[in-house]
Image (cartoon, rainbow, N blue to C red):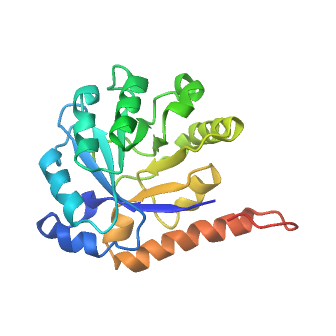
Amino acid sequence: MTTRINPSILAADFANLEHELSRIATADLVHVDIMDNHFVPNLTFGLPMVERLVQVSPVPLDVHLMIDDPDRWAPGYAEAGAASVTFHVEAAADPVRLARRLREIGARAGIALKPGTDAAPYLDLLDEFDQVLVMTVEPGFGGQSFMPETMPKLRRVADAVAARGVDVWLQVDGGITVDTIGIAADAGADTFVAGSAVFRGEPAEQIAALREAVAAHRHDDAPRTGRLLG
């Protein structure tokens, strides 16, 4: 199983973002949280910032829209060059139509679910999406503690992905550290957003440690006979 580590620049030094991006060149994508102070009570970046980040980032952009009316605004982020654009189902008028539009532009289309949002209405629609983000904190602020009570929902999505045989990345975001990443991996996650756990140390070392934590967990959970998970 592929492991993707996507550092969140919400924890980076905003005054030196180009330098901060250069420090995470060993990551898979860079997670960019777009907040509008309406859908969530915080304000971060907008489209002009994403357009510039695309030009200087050594890894593709994984944009997470925590905004109202993503049906209107999300396509612009795909057009700006984001490799992946994830929007919240709670804010979207027509998630399937929006995902199809993002794919037409050339971006991966993802849906995000708040901790209290039921995944059941979307399990029959999984082939319409490239990624499902199960929030492991309430969206809006970095540095929050991981919510293990979201893991049964992640497992239900993972089971549905496996049953349908679709290529959908399962992302978690919030409180991901070397101590919690294994819990999320065990529930089926393969794509991990980490902010403080990456930028509060040497990012390359922290990214490697997160990968190793997932690999060790999968090794420990593998059957004692046969091929190890990996």
Q: Exactly how many numbered labels are in the figure?
A: 0
The spot of residue 158 in percent (x, y) is 62, 42
Residue 75, quarter of picture: top left
Left or right, 2 with reference to 53: right
Q: If the image is split into quadrants, where does the N terminus sit?
A: bottom right
Depicted 167 relative to depicted 197: above or below = above
Residue in the image at 77% along x and 63% along y: 222
- The quadrant in which the C terminus is found is bottom right
Q: Position of residue 224 (x, y in %)?
A: 85, 68
- Whether residue 135 is visible to the viewer of this picture, yes or no, is yes
Q: Position of residue 227 (x, y in %)?
A: 81, 67
Direction right: furthest residue: 225
Seen at 53% across and 22% down, the residue is: 121
Q: Is residue 198 left or right of residue 9?
A: right
Q: In the figure, is residue 115 to the left or right of 217?
A: left
**In the rendered image, the vertical position of residue 138 relative to residue 94, given as above or below:** below
Q: Residue at x 32, y 26 (%)?
A: 91
> In the displayed structure, would residue 62 be above or below residue 216?
above
Residue 58's quadrant in the figure?
bottom left
Front residue of 130/38: it is: 130
Q: Is residue 40 visible?
A: no
Whether residue 79 is situated above or below residue 28 in the rendered picture: above
Q: Nearer the viewer, residue 227 or 135?
A: 227
**Where is residue 47, by image quadrant?**
top left
Q: Position of residue 131 (x, y in %)?
A: 48, 43
